[in-house]
Amino acid sequence: MPAPADDGSHGLKARRFGSVEGLAILLVLLVAFRTPLANLVLGPGLQTWITVFVSVMIQAVPFLVFGVVLSAVIAVFVPRSFWARALPRHPVVAVPAAGLAGVVLPGCECGSVPIAGSLIRRGVTPAAALAFLLAAPAINPIVLTATAVAFPGNPEMVLGRAVASLVVAIAMGWLWLRLGRSDWIRLPHRSDFDDSSKARAFWASCRHDVTHAGGFLVIGAAAAATINVVVPESWLQTLAADPILSVLALATLAVLLSICSEADAFVAASLSQFSLTSRLVFLVVGPMVDLKLISMQTGVFGRRFAVRFAPATFVAAVLVGTGVGMVIW
């Protein structure tokens, strides 16, 4: 039986919408809406948005890059078994010691989650590893220096952030000792860098942290700029004027924005409508509880852990951050 003649309709049906067609449609839209787009670009709102976004990025990027590189050096060239040997054997004493160990590990929360998992694998008590997980992204020198630069007229913000973050980390570690259960943590198998060269592991760590932390920094800077432009000033003033609403609003914003701890101080500084106490809560909550951290904790420790640990940490961070802010200011 002879094959049916091809009239070309099959080829037309099989043709897919590709990049050329997409570019053509985009060009047509740009031409059609060139006048409103030009007004938008030249408008004061967009100029303000660009100013806020660029200022946040320029101030934050150097600290982000330096923190990522130094974190990779420590993660690759310092044996992870060192931490198990360095911490006290008694769990109650190991928790604050692990929290203070965060001072010597510059880096963002993206790196603290897998490192905490590695510590547990190497015999460190989970309570101490969790205290380290919460403290390291918030009290290391890179983050505190960035906070001092972001708040040049309020040096007490650095002290408040360090004290509140360390208190929350230790409190959550001791709370885990009291109420935590080992079956809530399910560590998946993951390959380490032990069998690869140091140079390859170093660059792999840098690429991972820059990709993740840099991406979240861009999102956070864009969100901060958008809030300053899109949200009516009267709304922000209403939230900022209420001491309770302002704290809850910025605590929730910290969870949603998921900004790297090496850059969040610059975003907090741009939210000048809010009180210093509410912005301190923003800086305490962000490195401990946000969307990306909840996702990472679920992947590293398991869902049963994350659904218990994240809400408890959020409540503790809000309460302690507010308390420290009320004492300082």
Image: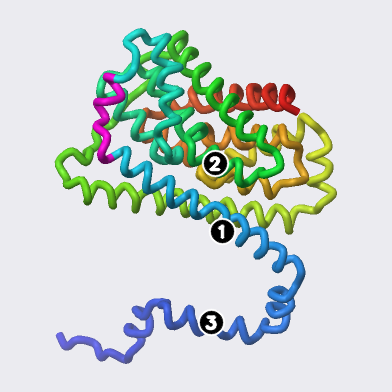
Task: State yes or no: discs 3 and 2 in contact (Cβ < 8 Å).
Answer: no
Q: Residue 230: x, y in percent?
A: 73, 57
The residue tagged 1 is: 58
Q: Distance between the residues labelled 3 and 2?
A: 48 Å
Crowdedness of circle 2 by 10 Å Cα count: few (<14), some, many (20+)?
Answer: some
Quarter of the image for residue 80 reads top left
Q: Label 2 sits on what residue type?
A: Thr
Q: For mark 3, what is the residue? A: 25
Disc 2, SS: helix
Observer able to see residue 298: no
Q: Does dot 1 land on a helix, a strand or a loop?
A: helix
Q: Which amino acid does label 3 sit on?
A: Ile
Q: Which quarter shows the N terminus? A: bottom left
Q: What stretch is highlighted in magenta?
A: 76-85
The structure residue drawn at horizontal position 34% and vertical position 17%, both measured from the top left corner, is: 87
> Is 83 one of the magenta-colored residues?
yes
Residue position for label 2: 145
Q: Which of 259 and 135 is in front in this view?
A: 135
Crowd tier of the residue under label 3, counting other residues whose Cα lies within 10 Å: few below 14, some 14–19, many 20 or above: few
The amino acid at mark 1 is Ile
